[in-house]
Amino acid sequence: MQRPEPSDSSAARPRRDSAATKQRLLTAATAEFAERGIAGARVDRIASAARANKRLIYDYFGDKDGLFDAVMDAHIDRIVDAVPIDAGDLPAYAGRLFSYALDHPDLLRLVTWARLEGRLGPTARDRSTQSYHRRLAAIEAAQQSGHVTIRFTPAQLLTLIESVSVGWMATTSAFLAAGEDDESPHRAAHREVVIESVRRLLT
Amino acid sequence: MQRPEPSDSSAARPRRDSAATKQRLLTAATAEFAERGIAGARVDRIASAARANKRLIYDYFGDKDGLFDAVMDAHIDRIVDAVPIDAGDLPAYAGRLFSYALDHPDLLRLVTWARLEGRLGPTARDRSTQSYHRRLAAIEAAQQSGHVTIRFTPAQLLTLIESVSVGWMATTSAFLAAGEDDESPHRAAHREVVIESVRRLLT
């Protein structure tokens, strides 16, 4: 992991430079994987965008799959925990999930590729599972204190909230609307629909 | 499109055989694209699975992208119109969308790859757009006759219904649950949640 780059000449620089190079590779790989997925990504393009030798990808990450795992590990906290759950106001939580997903389309694309290509490393899986159970516990506590309907289980409520706030991006209609206008008024109206929908689901 | 295969020897057989070969290629390509997407698909594997010469893929479909377009065209009616909308009972419609998507995971995967890889040919796009507007009109008519809430626009309602019934499959929780049990009781419970959710959205 701390192997010096070929051009390094001092004793102190290699470690620092390799960390910087590794970070540049991760940044370039994030963009490439989000755009093209694992099968479509090219390590040549990633190395070139990171101004690094392609060989370093294999030194640091093993192979293209290992690089994808490293990208997912680097972003998993932003994917699963960037929007803290507020079980006391789930409609507002849904609105924030919606805004966050729209603000970070690359993260949603990474997750979707990972799902389709069946690749989620142990670190990302553990962090996702922990986050999932933390959110379930928050909803369960809100149910026990009488603040949230018990008509649905915590897992069902979480799925519904995610579906309404984020899952719509995967629907056929969203696919058709991909080329359409996504200016602020439309977006604000959609966010309001998300919030109102979750309010209705909880009634 | 009706070019004979190299091994054909009679005057009558080539056309029939090429139609059969073309269909075998489409069937094999559907499985390959659903599994691996466009970038991940290999024409070698498709030709081999279809017991056809790889060259025929280029003869019939131009290239791998053209073959993907042909696959989407062949399935687009099943994707967008297999479940006819019933604006008089939208919760039941949502339940049927849910069951259909679970029964046809390959179709959902094809649509998701197409969306991520930004590839939807003119035929599939036209059919999707027509279906979309037909469904919007059905909801609008139900609103005008007082059978459906006007709290949401027809487009918003359609998005919500699709999100709750199908979009959940793209959420992080669904990704985590991918390896979990999906036996009948769990599925029936989820379908009931979908139906009840849409009922609540319409109240």
Image (spheres, coloured by chain):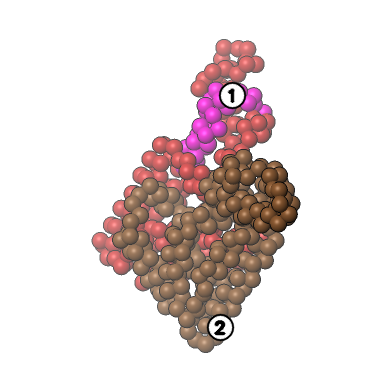
Chain colours: A brown, B red
Other-residue count near label 1 (Cα within 10 Å), few / some / many at <14 / 14–19 / ≥20 = many
Residue A161: x %, y % from top left: 48, 69
Depth order, front residue of B25/A124: A124
Q: Amino acid at mark 1?
A: Leu
Q: Position of residue B117 (x, y in %)?
A: 51, 44
Residue range corresponding to the magenta coloring: B51-76
**Disc 2 residue type (three-letter):** Ala
Residue B64 is one of the magenta-drawn residues: yes
Relative height, residue B110 to residue A164 (above, below): above
* Mark whose residue sits in front, 1 or 2: 2
What chain is tagged by disc 2?
A
Q: Quadrant of the C terminus of chain B?
A: bottom left
- Label number found at residue A141: 2
Q: Residue B56: which numbered mark, if any?
A: 1
Residue A121 at x, y percent in the picture: 68, 58
Q: Is residue B35 visible?
A: no
Q: Is residue A10 visible?
A: yes
